[in-house]
Image (cartoon, rainbow, N blue to C red):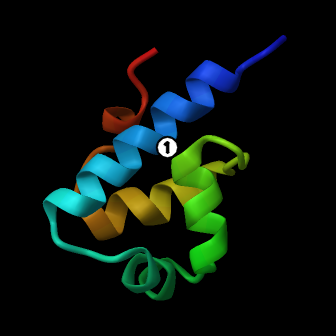
Amino acid sequence: MDNEAEKRSLGSNIRHEREQRGISQRQLALMTGTSRSYLWKLEGGSADVGIDVLCKIARVLDVPVGSFIDF
């Protein structure tokens, strides 16, 4: 099954929430224990994400995990 559109949507939603809070990719990477290049790929829809990382991102951005998923 091709899930490229869903990955792009997820990444776009993460980017939107991050930018709304004025947090850079580098800052978010440090706060979540990931790398900036991984977040760049994730926000661009070209990286897969595990639930543990998704939960960390949601926690840092103070949003429910479900807010990233609108498909």
Quadrant of the image containing the N terminus: top right
In the depicted structure, whether residue 59 falls above or below residue 25: above
Residue at (73%, 46%) from the top-left corner? 48
Residue plotted at (57% across, 77% down)? 36
Instruction: Give residue 14's position: percent from left, percent from top.
Output: 39, 49
Q: Which residue is mark 1?
A: 11
Left or right? Give the position of 67 relative to 14: left
* Badge 1: residue crowd in 10 Å (few <14, some 14–19, many ≥20): many
Residue 16 or residue 32, whichever sits in front: 16
Q: Is residue 36 above or below residue 58?
A: below
Is residue 24 or residue 67 the one in the foreground?
Answer: 24
Numbered disc 1: secondary structure:
helix
Where does the image place residue 17, in percent across and percent down from the top left?
Answer: 25, 52
Q: Quadrant of residue 6?
A: top right
Left or right side of 32 for 12: left
- Seen in the image, is 53 located left or right of residue 10? right
Q: In percent of the image, x 38 and y 20: which residue is there?
A: 70
Three-letter code for the amino acid on which mark 1 is drawn:
Gly
Residue 65 visible? The answer is no
Q: What is the residue that sits farthest to the right in this orientation?
A: 1
Q: How many marks?
A: 1
Residue at position x 46%, y 14% from top? Answer: 71
Kindly tell me whether residue 42 is visible in this rendering. yes
